[in-house]
Amino acid sequence: VKDVGIHAMEVYFPRTYVEQVELEAFDGASPGKYTVGLGQQQMGFCADQEDIQSFCLTVTANLLKKHQIDPKTVGFLAVGTETIVDKSKSVKTQLMQLFPDNSDIEGVDVTNACFGGTQTVFHAVDWVYANHSLLESRWAIAVMGDIAVYDAGPVRCCGGAGAVALLIGPNAPLAFDRGLRAVHMQNVYDFYKPQMNSEYAVVDGRLSIQSYLMALDSCYQLYKAKHAQLHDGVPVDLSSFEAVVFHSPYTRLVQKGFGRLAFHDFLAGRSGHLTNIDELLPFRDTPLDATYGERTFEKATLAASESLFKQKTDPSLLIARRNGNMYTASLYGGLCSLLFNRSPAELAGQQILLFSYGSGSAAAMYSLRVSPDAQALSSLRASAVDAAFRLQQRVKVTPQAFTQALQMRETMMGKSSYEPQALRSDSGEGMQFGMFPDTFYLTKIDEKFRRHYEQI
Ligand code: ACO
């Protein structure tokens, strides 16, 4: 078995979104704070007729249907999410309704903030390597999704919602570099959800940013060391990769992160691909710990990496900028955006570097090798074009209606005998029209807390 990786991809996000410019005005934030300061354009959200199980049903059903995957040919399926609707029953088991004639499917849910998706992907890859044999040649599927909502206040603009499903098997057009994963895990209370009846996180914003950047530094250094060990001492730097894709809480943080990677290249004496090197010189001997949040350092690393960022990372930020933070699915929405913005011919034969971060914290950096045959990317490319098209088909609603939708979600928490308010004809602007065709939605939570779904 070789070249285990991604054969097909499906992305789902809700049909409703709010404009960040309008949210700035609504929240009384200074104009430009969300759009320029955080680099966010729009934010996707859903009311109470969708939940994490309906998201995952939609994205998995679409993957099977659009790529004509016979449910009997799937042997592994796991879900990464931090949007918990049950402390015991996994979302994975709900997805088994899509596999009526096949109960032999390994995998359950994985949870740690935004990292559960990547761990699910790793499990799927590892399942293929560990199990493929004469007896077993079935697909693995990794599903990740979240509904990212914050309490009213300045952090609410950092939400988003969506899910991604990846079809994983051998001889893939996007193959994982085997044995080359750099991980950073640490005990940090930067973002966590201790309140069982609330979807809102407790956030220490500054700490979460520092924790993201520290994990990034650590993973890049480790990735480079492991790469050199695996490849006879051959070093890598940012110029070794056609694209660098990040988990994106908001896109300005990604740009700052990219600047730090450029700084590591500079420290390693590999700065041929950087500009304005003079501005980095004063920081040559500064300990990394002293650089977090340091303004002149940030300015220097952004200047050194600006054109490289536009080339290697900006193309992967389309969905992140327009739909917000999909938590576990964010990085994979980034991969989808890259496949939309860069042609198969440009990506064929190249390497892509990826960084995943989940608060708490758990992070990893790894790389994908793209098949030299551009034709092999055509199905992935078609899915990316379809997702980008759907981004344009969404319905804009006002910040008032967005607030109302989140209130509906608050009302739903912990309830039995509940019917979604958004399905009522008097539910307010945009809500009753807020779903794409083929979307699964929650019809009721019955008196025994069992959830029931239908598909549009
Ligand atoms: N025009 C342009 N820029 C502006 C404006 C304006 N009018 N107003 C503010 N800004 C800039 C600020 O200078 C700041 O830039 P900086 O980050 O370079 O310093 C940025 O916009 C944000 O402004 P702050 O005053 O820092 O905003 P606030 O204190 O409200 O907090 C934060 C921002 C921490 C990101 C908060 O929204 C948050 O906690 N978000 C959720 C946590 C998060 O996403 N963490 C990241 C990793 S963890 C994860 O993935 C969930």
Image (spheres, helix red, strand yellow):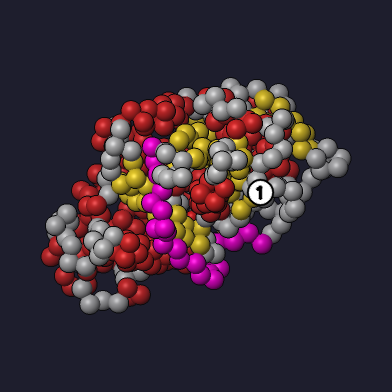
How far across and how far down the image is residue 139, in percent?
55, 38
Q: Looking at the image, which residue is at 36% across and 31% down?
A: 376
Outermost residue, right direction?
447
Q: Looking at the image, which residue is at 79% across and 45% down?
A: 415
Outermost residue, front direction?
134
Badge 1 is on which residue? 108
How far across and how far down the image is residue 133, in percent?
55, 44
Magenta residues, start to end: 173-194
Q: Is residue 85 left or right of residue 434?
A: right
Nearest the eye: 190 or 124 = 124
Q: Please check the rendered image and state whether residue 434 is part of the magenta-colored stretch, yes or no.
A: no
Q: Main secondary structure of the magenta part?
A: strand
Q: Is residue 75 left or right of residue 291?
A: right
Q: Residues within 10 Å of mark 1 (few under 14, many from 20)?
A: some
State ligand 1's quadrant.
Answer: bottom left
How far across and how far down the image is residue 414, in percent?
77, 49
Residue type pointed to by label 1: Val
Secondary structure under tag 1 reads: loop
